[in-house]
Image (cartoon, grey):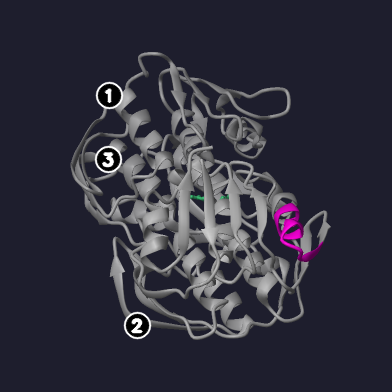
Amino acid sequence: MDFIVTPGGQPAGEVQVPGDKSISHRAVLLGAIARGDTRISGLLEGEDVLRTVEAFRAMGVEIHREGPGLLQIRGVGRSGLQAPASGDLDLGNSGTAMRLLAGLLAGQRFDSTLRGDASLSRRPMGRVCTPLGEMGAEISATEDGCPPLRIRGGQTLRGIRHHAVVASAQVKSALLLAGLYASGRTCVREPAASRDHTERMLQGFGVRVESVDGATCLRGGQELRGTRLEVPGDISSAAFFLVGAAISPGARLRLPGVGVNPTRTGILHLLERMGARIERSNPRLAGGEPVADLLVEGGELQGIHVAPEEVPGSIDEFPALLVAAAFARGETRVRGARELRVKESDRLAVMAEGLRRAGIFVEEQEDGILVRGGSFSGAEIDSHGDHRIAMAFAVAGWRAAGAIRVRDTANVATSFPGFVATARGAGLGIQEHTA
Ligand code: S3P
């Protein structure tokens, strides 16, 4: 699949972004191992989350879809999962599903194997396998530390104190989930705060999570109680439209019901620093998460410096942010962002390649990037199968000087099903083309 975007027009009206991907995975996972029923509304029905749903069905959990974004899960309790019939769980493109499930399955009585597509099969898993091994888990990966992961069930786990070198919510979550099955207390300390959806949601399911000397901790053996959950709109999906509007002087776009958890709002602060106007209104809570309506107004942007400590709070938004940088006056520098190299693609390299193709000056560094704002020409861009790269270059079409063709866009369905229709509704001249 390719996108073809005709330049021009202006973002206007209202965009309803789909449910948050991180929160949706966690809602399904915790609902499955809770006692009693869990009802989820606003679930993201993207391919990644559907892989998580299918994984739990394969482990004997009854999950009923009652309407768009509405799931009823018959929780089986902490020890009620069954061995998947085929032994293998295919998690497609989803790093979150793989890392969180690695933690959860390390504590089960049965063996399992986790695999993924070509992109996921290149992603590092040592960051979860090593600390899980310290807890007593038996997990093997390839020689390079990549999937498939073979997990040996029936191990006795013990709580550890883990001091993570990189801030990663996936690692933190994997260890906390394994910690539910471990003796004693499991604690994770991070160099910077990563998203805290797991901690918030565990508490919604009745689990005590504590903060001890700056680490996030829980005691093993706690049971989860089924609950009702409303999933907020995904700020990472909103980011493409925030950027599309921010780079378009005179644009005014409303995005209702977006999750504004402070561990995720880096993109709002960075765009505001570039000169964008973003207004939040109607603040409320949904499923223990802060939500607000956003109104963004476009204007002339200027380049900024993004410091290493600002990276975790906007980790998934760099493809979009770097597109904004390409339309801004002056230079944008990002440092301390080596993690971007191990996402669905090497996002530093793939963004550098795409921006250069559009005539933008870019300097790629080992752990960052410099983008000099300039004139963005029409171009043919290879997304390398990365959903966020594809959407970032699509919204550049609003201001590019010529048509943008983005190649290999099918994976947009992993996080934003209906992106093309939504973008068209907001005024983008986008067509989908089967290559
Ligand atoms: C996620 C955490 C982030 C993010 C990913 C989703 C999560 O990864 O990039 O898209 O749901 O926990 P890391 O925690 O590995 O940085």
- Tell me which corner region of the image, top left, top right, bottom left or bottom right, holds residue 87: top left
Q: Nearer the viewer, mark 3 or mark 1?
A: 1
Q: Name the residue under label 1.
A: 60
- Tell me which corner region of the image, top left, top right, bottom left or bottom right, holds residue 273: bottom right
Q: Name the residue under label 3.
A: 34
Q: Give the image location of residue 362, x and y in percent.
A: 80, 63
Q: What stretch is highlighted in magenta?
A: 352-362
Callout 2: SS: strand
Tell me: 83 left or right of 355: left
Q: Give the image location of residue 152, x and y in percent.
A: 51, 19
Find residue 321 and name its label.
none
Q: Give the image location of residue 75, x and y in percent.
A: 23, 36
Q: Name the residue type under label 1.
A: Gly
Q: Name the residue type under label 3.
A: Ala
Rendered-image quadrant of the C terminus: top right
Identify which residue is drawn at 55% across, 29% down.
117
Query: How far apart are the two marked residues, 3 and 1, measured between alpha carbons?
Result: 13 Å
* Position above or below: 342 against 289: above
